[in-house]
Amino acid sequence: MKTKAIITFCALAFALNALVANAQAIEKRTIKLETKKTGIEVSPTFSGIFFEDINQSLDGGICAQLIQNFSFQQYMVPDAPAKEFSQADSIIFGWSTVLKGDAKGKVITVSEKPLIKDMPRYYDYDPNDKYNDELRYIQYCVKFNIENAGEGFGLAANGYGISEYGNERAGHYYSNNTQVPSIAVNRGVSYDLSLYLQGANYEGKLSVYLEDAQGRANSETFVINSLKNEWTKHTATLKAERTTDCRLVVIADKEGTFYMDFVTLLPEASELWMDGKMGPFRKDLMQALADLNPTFMRFPGGCASEGTNYFGQVFWKNSVGDVEQRLGFRNHWGYWTSQYVGFYEYLLMAESLGATPLPVLNNGVTCQFAGHQYIAPLETPEDKQRFYNIFVKDALDFIEFCNGSTDTEWGAMRAKMGHPQPFNLKYLGIGNENKGEAFWERFDIMYKAIKEKHPEIIVVTTSGAADAGKEFNDNYAQIDEKYPDTYVDEHYYKGDDWFFKNRDRYNADKVRGGQGLTYDRERPTRVFVGEFANNRTNNAYASTLAEAAYYTSLEQNSDMVVMAAYAPLFCKKGFNKWNSNLIWFDNRGLWRTTNYYYMKLFSKAGNMTFQTSDVMNGETVDEHIYISPTINTTSGEIYLKLVNSEPIAKELEVALDNRNTYKVTIEYMTTDDTSIKNQGHQNYYSSYPGIVNFNYNEAIVPQTIGFGPVKKNFSVDIPQNSVCVIKLIPVK
């Protein structure tokens, strides 16, 4: 029998009914919450994020450094496709020559006197790689040869932009050497400039300032009156006068020769995440991550960790220490990773989010999923020693970097960079979506070395790139036999039907793959769903319903699935190499997908599951309602995560098994059009002038309604096509 609580609920019912006025008649359902019958403890690391440098998510993305190709290394890569990469000295990626009046001259990249002549060499050249990896260590700067200064001769950094119409290839969009000013500045904000110059014989002066697309100065001018015969760092602050897209101009007023290297531009500290104290990160993108309440963070890949060739793999030592001494590279996704943000900054990012770090290292096998063929040799004693020095020792040194005392080599490096306290690394991934004898032979070597020296570290391995089939079965056979104490990283990109139909995938009595085995809770092996997304409807609301339904089952089995993360995390508009992405952004703002919002809603969780009755209509179970009930055993707060996957609104009568009084809040999303996407047209180009006040409104966002107090029984209307979280807060 309904209580007086129904009366207090009228406003809520009215509001929700208005959303479904055109739907079919509301169906009535009942559910009993049996909170005293607790189930499994929800994994404390259950809901996390996966950051991979894909879709231009790092440089020009979450990294707030605004100058593309700041060290003039970008795309000095052998065998680089001409359409994607600079091939001639006269083309400097991300920069353009400035000629005022009758100015005449050249700016070229040269290796004769770079800022850092001898880069740290942690890794040697591998003759087994078909690429000439030795060339990666060659460093460049730019040389100005000015024949006639005219009214000014110089070079301009255009920022991270794309040409207006992009360069479409097979549905993906590739970085272009844009000539379009795309440094998005805001009026009144100061930007911290740094550049290195050399040229004692040059007798002119240099002027550095922000300039808009019409050629008008948009900041005060920083003037450098003389240069020295050695590399000298010059710094200044440029305050933007107008909100617009700009370029950074370095212009000279006399004939002569001088050199420039390592030009950076960062927004003032107040514009950075946590005032820049936890890395050079965009505040808006980091806040979006923080709002997800992630419990762990996997980085830096994915396929990006393994690369396309020997030096396309991610070597963490190339990414730490002084930023001037970090070795950039062409990444797996075909563009440049500068490593201005490296492993140290990733660890800071995780720490600032309150997330446990889960870094991934490669084991000498390039990305098999993409068909790359490099495998670190093990045939000779020399090969084996080299494998140990580069891959095994790399992993052990990384653990030392994260957890070692400051009197160790790599613990001292961490302290020197500003973090004397250890990062308390607990997990380390080896490989990604791998298979076959070559991978497992090299995994075995690294696994044994890690566990011998650091038995406390949980090693994360892989089930491959599919949710089932031969590769999945073969990999699990290896794991079952040799590595039962690992976390197994499972990946799947599927469609709506798969997510709805696999609600029981991790139930203890369900068969796992083709071995006739179950996800056995008695064994130490646990599952890490490191990458999943609905890649058929590509961030349409329909994908949200399917994923959210599936996610409830993951939480209900979080004694087996101890970690889960959507993938990919970010995509910059115009640079999508993967269409299902959690957050879309451009140079000025972001769009949160509806997939993002269900994950944000579901991040509100208790620490223990409990039982419910089936959602009933008489004797009929509603197969279109998906539920995960949890309780906070300390506060008594109850969370009922619920997905209604039908275009039919439902009145849900909730029966409690205790006499407590509760205040109720409901957060929900709903729509009658499941094709809607919050980010609109996915390949919309917004990184060029004229787009200053672009509309970042999202079509569907969560709504919140509260009511109460209620006791024992109460009713709520669950809208059509909805994702809901019903929260019951005890009233004392």
Image: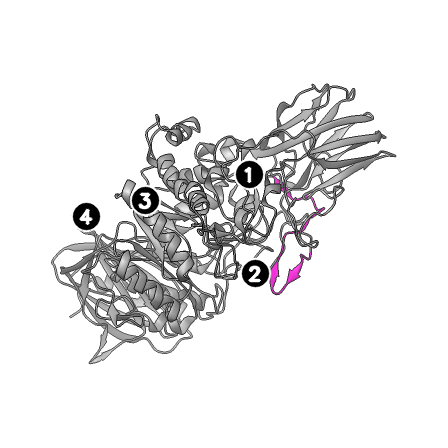
The answer to whether the residues at label 3 and label 4 have Cβ atoms under 8 Å apart is no
Q: CA distance from mark 4 to mark 1?
A: 50 Å
**In x, y percent, where is residue 268?**
54, 31
Q: CA distance from mark 3 to mark 4?
A: 40 Å
Mark with earlier residue (4, 1): 1
Q: Specify few, some or many for label 1: CA neighbours under 10 Å numbering under 14, 14-19, or 20 or more.
A: many
Which of labels 1 and 3 is toward the front? 3
Residue 166 among those drawn in magenta = yes
Magenta stretch secondary structure, dominant: loop
Mark with earlier residue (1, 2): 1
Q: CA distance from mark 1 to mark 2?
A: 32 Å
Which of labels 2 and 4 is toward the front? 2
Q: Residue 635's mark?
A: 4
The answer to whether the residues at label 1 and label 2 have Cβ atoms under 8 Å apart is no
Please, what secondary structure does the residue beneath circle 4 have? loop
Please, what secondary structure does the residue beneath circle 2 have? loop
Q: Residue 682's mark?
A: 2
Q: Residue at x 39, y 44 (%)?
A: 392
Quadrant containing the N terminus is bottom left
Bounds of the magenta segment:
165-185
Q: Residue 450's mark?
A: 3
Q: Which residue is mark 1?
A: 327
Q: Specify few, some or many for label 2: CA neighbours under 10 Å numbering under 14, 14-19, or 20 or more.
A: some
Q: CA distance from mark 1 to mark 3?
A: 26 Å
Mark with earlier residue (3, 4): 3
Q: Is residue 720 visible?
A: no
